[in-house]
């Protein structure tokens, strides 16, 4: 196993990729999005700089983003076509490659907490629907009523979509998902991803976020990956696992592997972005949308929060 990452830590977070451009973004929205990303980074930094685990850091960062109504995960998730909120989440650690995931969760406040409980307290990896919420109640994980998740802006977005039944699901090109990847001072990596999915989703649609190897993956021999974007493309390309595999097998470093997968995504017509925390080196990202809500920090003092492609 590579150990050159030991002794230093690195973290990256994202809050979704999409059509955000400097010229058209409301300055207040720019400010509050950056503040939300900074808060998520700070929650993770507090853990990592005191020698805490990457798994705790990514869970803490994603919890902050799930509770922030600006981002499409947990509270503030988008609505399904039926006017419900159904959340997906996954978490994975790179030491033993343990993973937990949930899909279609409707009454659990923090889906990422539930995903971690599936990983640590069940013999399973992936639970869905009412069974997943039932597992949460059985294991004492905090519940929330449907109206706790709802916001007027997400309701407006659904109404806009339903008013135009021909509109594609990617109307507005805002692929909201949140995620975090980290490497801790012991050299272990972890990834966490959480989302409400797509506005107007139907038929129990599940995206890439909770699918291990598609939207979320971690392997200490390579690094940790969390994706955001049009989930169907990320599933078809097994984006997160392929980035890890190419890195582990020495095909490319993790930045080059991520760039290559974003290029493949573009060729197929997919849109989105990826954040990664490599086993060696600092965290980074790539995306093919005009913007991606993102941030990173490391033990050398790096602190960066960004939205647009030119920063
Ligand atoms: N990337 C999130 C989704 O497609 O649901």
Image (cartoon, helix red, strand yellow):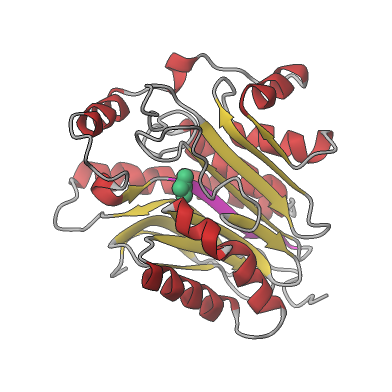
**Quadrant location, the N terminus:** bottom right
Q: Is residue 29 magenta?
A: no
Q: Is residue 182 magenta?
A: yes
Across the whole image, how many numbered discs are drawn on residues?
Answer: 0
Q: Nearer the viewer, residue 283 or 215?
A: 215
In this rendering, position of residue 87 left or right of residue 141: left
Q: Quadrant of residue 108?
A: top right
- Farthest left residue? 23
At 73% from the left and 64% from the top, the residue drawn is 219
Task: Specify the segment rendered in magenta.
Answer: 177-185
Give the main secondary structure, helix, strand or loop, of the magenta stretch: strand
The answer to whether any part of residue 126 appears in the image is: yes
- From what the image shows, is residue 203 above or below residue 241? above
**Quadrant location, the C terminus:** bottom left
Q: Nearer the viewer, residue 129 or 243?
A: 129
The answer to whether any part of residue 280 appears in the image is: no
* Image coordinates for residue 40, horizontal then vertical, percent: 51, 45
- From what the image shows, is residue 48 above or below residue 151? below
In this rendering, position of residue 246 left or right of residue 12: right
- From what the image shows, is residue 311 above or below residue 130? below
In this rendering, position of residue 276 left or right of residue 151: right
* Image coordinates for residue 115, horizontal then vertical, percent: 68, 37
Q: Quadrant of residue 270?
A: bottom left
Q: Quadrant of residue 263?
A: bottom left
- Farthest bottom residue? 251
In this rendering, position of residue 290 left or right of residue 97: left
Q: Nearer the viewer, residue 38 or 273?
A: 273
* Image coordinates for residue 22, horizontal then vertical, percent: 20, 58
* Image coordinates for residue 77, horizontal then vertical, percent: 42, 32
């Amino acid at each position: 196993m590579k150990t050159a990452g030991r002794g230093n830590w690195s973290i990256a977070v994202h809050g979704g990729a999409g059509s955000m451009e400097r010229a058209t973004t409301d300055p207040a929205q720019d400010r509050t999005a950056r503040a939300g990303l900074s808060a998520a980074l700070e929650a993770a930094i507090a853990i990592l700089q005191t020698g805490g685990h990457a798994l705790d850091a990514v869970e803490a960062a994603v919890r902050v983003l799930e509770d922030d109504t600006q981002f499409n995960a947990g509270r503030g998730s988008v609505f399904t076509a039926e006017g419900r909120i159904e959340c997906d989440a996954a978490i994975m650690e790179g030491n033993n490659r343990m993973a937990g995931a949930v899909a279609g969760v409707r009454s659990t406040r923090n889906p990422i907490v539930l995903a971690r409980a599936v990983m640590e307290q069940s013999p399973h990896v992936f639970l869905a629907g009412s069974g997943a919420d039932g597992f949460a109640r059985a294991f004492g994980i905090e519940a929330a009523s449907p109206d706790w998740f709802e916001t007027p802006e997400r309701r407006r977005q659904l109404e806009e979509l339903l008013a135009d039944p021909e509109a594609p699901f990617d109307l507005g090109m805002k692929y909201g998902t949140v995620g975090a990847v980290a490497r801790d001072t012991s050299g272990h990596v972890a990834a966490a991803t959480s989302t409400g999915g797509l506005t107007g989703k139907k038929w129990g649609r599940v995206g890439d976020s909770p699918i291990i190897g598609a939207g979320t993956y971690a392997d200490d021999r390579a690094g940790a990956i969390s994706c955001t974007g049009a989930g169907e493309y990320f599933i078809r390309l097994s984006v997160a696992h392929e980035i890890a595999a190419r890195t582990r097998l020495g095909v490319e470093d993790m930045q080059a592997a991520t760039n290559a997968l974003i290029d493949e995504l573009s060729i197929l017509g997919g849109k989105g972005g990826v954040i990664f925390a490599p086993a060696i080196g600092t965290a980074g990202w790539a995306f093919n949308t005009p913007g991606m809500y993102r941030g990173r920090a490391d033990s050398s003092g790096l602190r960066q929060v960004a939205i647009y492609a030119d920063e």
